Amino acid sequence: MDRIGLIGGVGWMSTMEYYRRLNLIAQAAGHHGSAKLVMYSMNFGDILKVQQNNDQEGEFQILLRAALELERSGATKILICSNTATDTCDRLATHIAIPTINIIDATVAAAKRSGFKRFGLLGTQEVMERGFYVERFDREGLQIILPRPAYREAVQDAFYDDACLYNFPEKATKAVRAAIDDLIVQDIDAVILGGTELPLTADRMSPSPGIELIDSIDVHIAAALQTDASIHALGA
């Protein structure tokens, strides 16, 4: 496994999940293996402030400082452990010499492999409404369907009031379940968990019969490892 650089802390609990899954994969390969990782953990409050102010340049500068530090520390590729913070990800390519694996591109690739065409999207309101996620799907002829506004607001609250603080109360899981149900009635084929805290919430819910969930952490790690296989098949 290459030495992967993780830009984490956005939030810290999903960064922990990246760390856990990457180490399970390394361990499954045998020989008491563990993952060769370098991590830059940001203060979530700093990046949340610039995101709430729609300060994309400020967000980029925070990510660039982290990426340069990881490059100096010997990372061979970078994963930003967040969907929301990926909007400015492509700009990093002109400032660092190592690749940044884009979580949205990885999710689009997984969606194309699924053979489906209509995808429900769950994430922060920035992910669902700012357009940078939807535009990438549109380019590939894939349709994104959003929950109705009230459900989007409830999912946003579930992120920032609960999941980002490593709290998973019943009201948060109910909000995510209700948003998935709202997408199902809109005749979607699969649901994209477009927030890296969402898989942790989904694990606490009963599955939705007949609806595939595309876990953005899974496909992000798979892209970093250059495999189309489910990371669960690799041991995570």
Image (cartoon, rainbow, N blue to C red):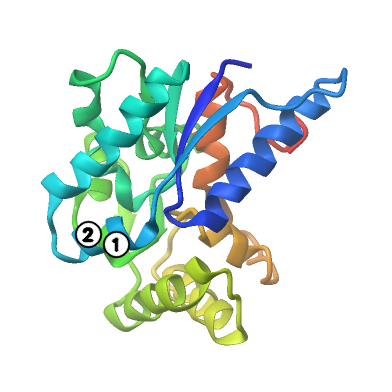
Amino acid of disc 2:
Gln
Q: Which residue is mark 1?
A: 48
Q: Nearer the viewer, residue 197 or 150?
A: 197
Q: Nearer the viewer, residue 18 or 113?
A: 18
Report if residue 152 is visible in the image. yes
Q: Position of residue 37 (x, y in %)?
A: 58, 27
Mark 2 Cα within 10 Å, few/some/many (few <14, many 20+)? some
Q: Position of residue 97 (x, y in %)?
A: 30, 13
Report if residue 140 is visible in the image. no
Residue 51 — which label?
2
Instruction: Kindly indicate the quadrant of the structure image that contains residue 232.
Output: top right
Image point (25%, 39%), residue name: 136
Mark 1 Cα within 10 Å, few/some/many (few <14, many 20+)? some
The residue lying furthest to the bottom in this view is: 171
The C terminus - image quarter = top right
Image point (58%, 57%), residue name: 199
Given contact means CB atoms under 8 Å apart, are the residues at marks 2 and 1 in contact? yes
The residue lying furthest to the right in this view is: 31
Q: Secondary structure at mark 2?
A: helix
